[in-house]
Amino acid sequence: MGPYYAMFPVNFADDVVTRYTAVGDAVLDPFAGRCTAVFSAASRGRSGLGVEINPVGWIYGKTKLGAAAESDVNDRLMQIGRHAGMYDSEARHLPLFFRHCFSASVRRFLVAARRELRWRRCAVDRTAMAFILIYLHGKRDYSLSNQMRQTKAMAPAYAVRWWSRAELKPPKVDPVEFLVKRVKWRYAKGRPNLAPSNVYLGDATKLLSRRPLDVRGSELLPARLLLTSPPYYKITNYHYDQWLRLWLLGGRPDAARSGEVNRGKFENLRSYRALLERVLSASARLLTDDAVVYVRTDRRPETLSATREVLKEVFPQKSYSERARPFKAPTQTRLFGDATSKVGEVDVVLLPR
C-alpha cells in the first residue's frame, strides 16, 4: 500500500524476518520508509517497531498496521466531499500548477481533506488520507491528477510546461466516487491479522535517544533483529520528491526543499556519517545481546564505506559479513532520467559471535 521511492522488496523483508527471528520476537527498523520491514514482522507473528521522518511513508505504514473499517473510511470520504464546497475560494487561489493538475471539483475536495482530516491521531482519518495520497497523482484515469508519475511528484514549472505543450487538461472526476471504488477493491480480501506493532513519526536521531518506544502495549521488548535500509548518500531527497503529497498534509504548495539536514539529500558526507552513527547507536540500546543486524545499503564507495565504519564501531562484538546484491533490472532512477549504470546494493549482516 502506497507508492514510494526505493522501497524494500516484500519478499526480501519476509525472508530476512523469517530466517533470523521466531514468532514472538521483535524487529526494529529506524529508517522505516513505508514500513515494509515492520509490516513483514507483524504479519508473521513478530512485533515490528519502526521510526519514519517522512509523514507520507508514516501514514502508509501506520495504516497498513491498523487500517480503519471500510464503512468508516467511506463515510469520512463522503463527508469530506460534502464539505468541499466550503473551500471553493481557497481552491481557486492555489498556484497555477494546481489548476493544470486537478479539476475544480478535485481541488475543492483536496483542500477540504487537507483542512479537515486529523491523520496524526485518528485511524479513520489517517486511512482516508492514505487512500487520497496513493491516488493523488499518477497516470490519467488511474489517479486524481493530470498525467504524472505516481512515485515522485514533478516540479511545478516543468509540469505546467509539459502539460501545456501536450495540451493535456486535468481529468474531470468525482473524487469521492473514484476513491470509494478503490477502497472497495483494497478491502475485497479483508484485513490481515497482525501482531501488535507500531511505527513512530519523527526524527530517529532524536526520538530513539529521548524516550522509550513500545512495540506491545506498555511493554518494551528488546528487538532480536535490526532490519533497515538507511537513505543512500546523495541519491534522492524524499521530501522534495513527495512535495505534492506533503502539501496535502499541510506543507508548502511548492517543491522547495525543507532545509533540515535529516530531511534532505544527504550531500555532506560528514553529516551523513553522523546520521548513521546517531541512529544506529541509539538503535543498539533496543536490541537483545544476540540480535542480528541486517542493513541493505548502496554499493557506491561513499555510502558503503560510511556504513561499514559505523556498523563496526557500534557493533564491535558481532561478526561482520557482506553479500553483494547486484541490480538485475533497470532501477527506479531510470524513470527519472538517470540511465547511468548502477553498481547495485550490498547486504551487511552482523551476527552474534
Image (tube, rainbow, N blue to C red):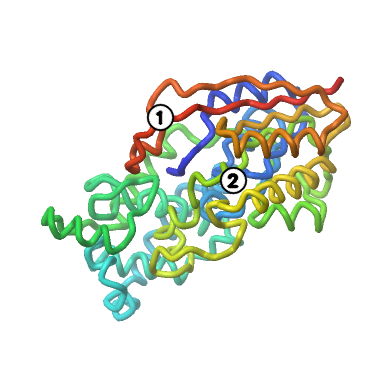
State the residue in front, 271 or 150: 271
- Regarding mark 1 in the picture, which secondary structure is present there? loop
Q: How many numbered discs sit on the rendered protein?
A: 2
> Mark 1 near mark 2, Cβ–Cβ under 8 Å?
no
Indicate whether 128 appears above or below 15. Answer: below
Q: Amino acid at mark 2?
A: Gly
Residue where numbered disc 1 is placed = 341
Residue appearing at x 39%, y 60% in the figure: 244
Indicate whether 14 appears above or below 231. Answer: above
Q: Is residue 16 left or right of residue 174?
A: right
Q: Is residue 202 left or right of residue 123?
A: right
State the residue in front, 110 or 4: 4
User: Quick one: which residue is furthest to the bottom in this view?
Assistant: 89
Residue where numbered disc 2 is placed = 66
Q: In which quadrant of the rendered view does residue 159 lie?
A: bottom left
Indicate whether 284 appears above or below 350. Answer: below
State the residue in front, 135 or 123: 135
Q: CA distance from mark 1 to mark 2?
A: 39 Å
Q: Amino acid at mark 1?
A: Ser
Residue appearing at x 11%, y 56% in the figure: 167
User: Callout 2 environment at 10 Å: few (<14), some (14 to 19), or many (20+)?
Assistant: some
Residue appearing at x 63%, y 34% in the figure: 304
